[in-house]
Image: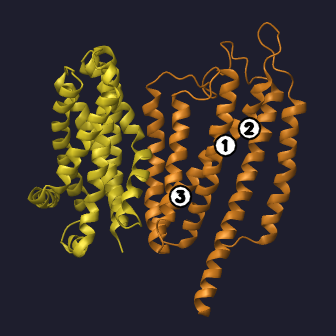
Amino acid sequence: MKKSLYIAAKDLRSEFRTKQMLNSMLIFSLIVIVIFSISFGDVLSQTELVEKLAPGVLWVAFTFAGTLGLSRSFAGEMENGCLEGLKLSPIDRSSIYIGKTISNAILMFIVELLTIPIFIVLFNYNISGIPGLALVIFLGTFGFVSVGTLLSALSASTRAREIMLPVLLLPLIIPVIIPAVMATGTILTDGGIGSIASELRLLVVYDLIFFVVGQLVFEYTVMD
Amino acid sequence: MLIDRKKEKVLAIITAPVMLIAIGMIFFYVPQMKGNAGEILDSSFKIFYFHLPIAMVSYLAFTVVFIASIMHLKGNSSKWDIVAHSAAEVGVVFAFLVLVTGSIWAKATWGWYWIWEPRLTTSLALFLVYLAYLMLRQALEEPEKRARLAAVFGIVGFISVPLSFLSIRLWRSAHPLMFGGSSYGSSGGGLEGTSLQLTLAVNMLAFALLFASLLVYRINNEALKEELEEMKYNHS
């Protein structure tokens, strides 16, 4: 566990030196929000309509920005034999996976933390139930990242890896996006954590299953 | 892995008449559906005898992909990879047919082709996952690596399908429950007649046989292709 934290720290350190990925993720999610805001410009004055749009818009922004970030997560390691270096280091392969998952999740949390205020401003919307929303976003993001990290490693060795990742990832994250969107919608309208218990349970199950399966099969994606 | 060409033919020869009988039963054997008041119901229900067996076959195909993927990662032999690839291809065709037959039936009974509803969304997700699986295979050239990565995706993809069913279950379902609940109408009058059950059983058998023969042909094709590649390689 400690070793995977080293991997995560290494990733984050190299990321914060350039902030290349973080910046492009941020700008991308900003653009998504702006486009939605422009296209729904007529209905922004009606709060009940915005309430219906909000979960979808937010999760589209998160998912797209996350996919963008994930596609670089392993592509960066392919250069200069970094992946060989990682594989040679005296740690389990699954520690690499866990470390990468942690660092990707942290990057996505940062993006989400900055996207929500922009959303509030551009959609003229007052978000209620912050703790519940944070919990839903945490669980949803973790599930997304645990599948995404695995597929990032998988698609890094394919031809045209940038287009392969969304194609592979989006069908697989349907089961995490649906409960996440629904729970976000419930939280935004009446805001009780008790009312989204079944969604939360499903998110937790999804996260656990894919985190465990990811660790089991990750070894095969980087083997050569 | 190459299955005897004779056996392959036998399977096809058995499948063809069973399929014919199955189709014949749908149109000539099954009695008219009658509603509670005795009125003759729409014959659109007959597509059900295709729809359910096709759906079962697609699930079966993807289960084969899942098992073959695990076996491949465990044993690392290319024959399981061929099985997984063939089953995925056949399965995608059937998954697409599930969507098509389902949509046609839905248009006739509900009045629209598509609604966002558990069973439909799961079928769509299933179709997309295995389409992505085939895309992944195309994007990889090196056979060993392709087999390994496709196996990983085959495992992860299969796991996500029951979850997507559960997640969409949170919505209310408009799709009739065929097992473990009353099927058509509140009185459960749907699938109780012997003739209906018999027709359904024959159709299931026919589609299972169709799947088996398609799979066998596909596997043989792939094995022959590999043999050819090897010969070319040795020759040059």
The residue sitting at 75% across, 52% down in the picture is B210
State how the image is colored: by chain
Front-most of residues B85 and A56? A56
Tell me which residue sits at (26%, 21%) in the image.
A188
Between circles 2 and 3, the one closer to the viewer is 3
Q: Do the residues at discs 2 and 3 belong to one chain? A: yes
Quadrant assignment for the N terminus of chain A: bottom left
Q: Which residue is mark 3?
A: B134
User: Of marks 2 and 1, which one's residue comes earlier in the chain?
Assistant: 2
In the image, what residue occupies the spot 19% across and 19% down?
Answer: A126
A101 left or right, relative to B60: left
Mark 2 residue type:
Phe
Q: Return the residue found at the far right.
A: B28
Pick the front one: A175 or B74: A175
* Left or right: A168, with B126 as reference point: left
The mark nearer the N terminus, 3 or 1, is: 1
- The residue that disc 2 covers is B50
In the rendered structure, the colour chosen for chain B is orange
Residue A74 is situated, as x and y percent measured from the top left of the image, at 28, 62
Q: Is residue B180 left or right of residue A35?
A: right
Real-space Cα distance between discs 3 and 1? 17 Å
The kind of residue tagged 1 is Leu
Q: Secondary structure at mark 3?
A: helix
Crowd class of label 3 (few under 14; some 14 to 19; many from 20; radius 10 Å): some
Residue B195 appears at what percent x and percent y?
84, 28
